[in-house]
Image: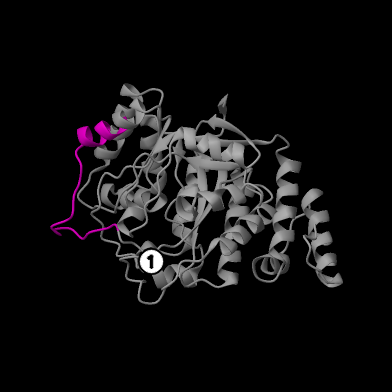
Amino acid sequence: MNVGVRVCEPVLAMLAEIRDKALNGKRLGRDEGRWLLTEAPLLEVGALASEVRFARIPDKVVTFVIDSNPNYTNVCVTDCQFCAFYRKPGDPEAYTLTVEEVLAKVAFAAGKGATTVLLQGGHNPALPLEYYTTLVRETRRRFPQVTPHFFTASEIQTIAEVSRLTVGGVLDRLWEAGQRTLPGGGAEVLSERVRKRIAPKKGGPSAWLEVHRAAHRRGFKSTATMMYGHVEQPDDLLDHLDAIRELQDEAGGFTAFVPWSFKPGHTLLEKWVKQVKGPNVYLRMLAAARLYLDNVPHIQASWFSEGKPTGQIALHFGADDWGGTLFEENVHKAADYVNTITVEEITALIREAGFTPAQRTTTYEILRTC
């Protein structure tokens, strides 16, 4: 689509080639991915991503989930350069909630109609395996309507270290307790160079991928995320997309891809990263992901990190999901970024953008059309 701007023949030819591949089940290569991320005309890429979205998901339905994102501890020993949330052990502002205090947060979310609680926290070496399995088991017992979407990959790695189990052993215990899904947080950018720079204690991309690979092999579903806008270059982003695509080829366990932009407030990276990447960068990332990740079914529009108007536009750039209500969220809040929404506002914004809102589960089963 040429929206009132002349596009030269080589660009039109490249767009046509990518369109042909994307609509006919042919995989894009790195050169094409790099072009989408750096040079391709934004509106044309958005229109193509939208066309591919409807080829894969024909209905004009945009899903959302009623959820909350509380935290059980901010104690962390990993010292990530991008994080404003964590506190070191012994810090006056450090906290760790008891099991009952966490379950009170789950009860609050359940009382507001939540079907998902995304629980995450710092890497706290003082917490035993039983703490985590009890949280899952009691959530399942007391709130059977709520999916415990608990613990990112790096938290699973920490639990394994503390409990002296393998990652697979920890996942087996969580499965026995009733957990079936994992959030995709903690990926940042799956590039050796980037991870070494902003999160050296987390390990390289293989650390995050190991957890999701082991989880998918056991039947867990998970999301794949990306936090961009700090020290990455286009090839780092392609490393990330390639890693997600390759792992999805193995087991098909990713339900969705969720990118968002880094918020530098109160972080150690703040002195180097002064400006948050704007909506154009976000929309390009989203559209490129829809075209490049040919085996990931859903692309989520992050109204929370990018703003509600950008979230609406994202629905025309390849996204088919609005994300969740996030009744509670503290990680972005620690970086002085706060955004809230109600179910009524979600449905109104989706309709205003030209789509039909539908409430979904954690694993994208539709519960009701709104």
* Label total for image: 1
**Extreme-bottom residue of the structure:** 272
Residue 11 location in percent, x, y? 80, 69
* Front-lying residue, 264 or 240: 264
Task: Locate residue 309 relative to residue 295 in the image: left or right.
Answer: left
**Which residue in the protein does label 1 denote?**
264
Q: What segment is highlighted magenta in the picture?
A: 85-106
Residue 366 location in percent, x, y? 57, 28
What amino acid is labelled 1 in the image?
A: Pro
Helix, strand or loop at label 1? It is loop
Residue at figure coordinates x 37%, y 65% from the top left: 82
Residue 186 location in percent, x, y? 42, 55
Above or below residue 246? Residue 222 is: above
Residue at figure coordinates x 55%, y 53% from the top left: 310
| Residue 100 located within the stretch drawn in magenta | yes
Q: Quadrant of the C terminus?
A: top right
